[in-house]
Image (cartoon, helix red, strand yellow):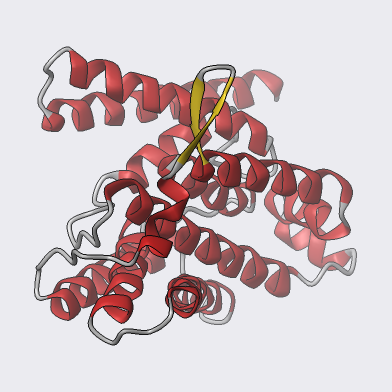
Amino acid sequence: MVVGVLAIGQTLIILTAGIDLSCGMVMALSSIVMTKFAVDLGLPPALCMVAALAVGAGFGLINGLLVTKMKLPSFIVTLGTLNIAFAITQIYSRSQTVTHLPPALVALGKTFSIGGTEISFGVVLMLALYVLTWWLLRDSARGRYVYAVGNNAEAARLTGIPVDKVLIWVYVTAGILYGVAAMLTVARTEVGDPQAGQTDNLDAITAVVLGGTSLFGGRGIVLGSLVGAMIVGVFRNGLTLMGVPSVYQTLITGILVILAVSFDQLSRKSVR
């Protein structure tokens, strides 16, 4: 479910022909801020969760401003913020796991039963976010703007679409979603782990591409990313059950990304 939420943010950015390499480390930093605020400062859990969302939104705003105002490639910008988020996470946490969390911070990891099947509240939240994002992209003006910018930013600008504002909105929204992912990873593991999220950016991008969203922007649906996230999750769990070391799992995931992008490129050429 963590990769599933990260994939929503990645979908929004990739639809605008960008990419966000920093999502996993922004999530890790958000989780450390949230748990350290709760344990070290004794702040109310609700305020700690807001802090996690604020960290994600802040990094999203920085990414969006650098992409729109400085005209830097999203790949370079988010590669830089990935390293910044990683460094801040290690410095602030002193590379130590945060434990003894208040129950409210791990409440999303609790489960309830439907027909004998245990379902966590975090899964319900993830599905709700997918439905909301799907509706926004399909039925709202801002959602249509996202597709227009991804198809052709200059043409969108000439038709009166505020391209820069759309891009900043996309990056900030994605950052908030990374904060939500931080809540889910803390709820699942019941600790604040400074080492979390180091391969989740690759998993999220893989999920989006496998779900049919084009890395060249303007084409795809967010519900496809949900299917892609499920494929990645089942794939990872299957390899783990088979005893495949994590480094080989990352290797195979990387190969999947290349194959999916190659297929997308070939399909674009065939359409032309």
User: From this viewpoint, is residue 90 visible?
Assistant: yes
Residue 64 in the figure: left or right of residue 98: right
Residue 157 in the figure: left or right of residue 166: right
Q: Is residue 49 above or below residue 271?
A: below
Q: Is residue 33 above or below residue 112?
A: below
In this view, the residue farthest toward the bottom is: 41
Residue 139 x/y as whole percent: 88, 47
Q: Residue at x 54, y 21 (%)?
A: 266
In-front residue for pair 95/211: 95
Quarter placement of the N terminus? top left
Q: Residue at x 63, y 72 (%)?
A: 168
Residue 203 in which image quadrant: top left
Residue 14 x/y as whole percent: 56, 48
Q: Is residue 9 above or below residue 166?
A: above
Residue 228 x/y as whole percent: 50, 27
User: From this viewpoint, is residue 75 visible?
Assistant: no
In-front residue for pair 255/249: 249
Q: Residue at x 28, y 87 (%)?
A: 41
- How many marks are shown on the rendered structure? 0
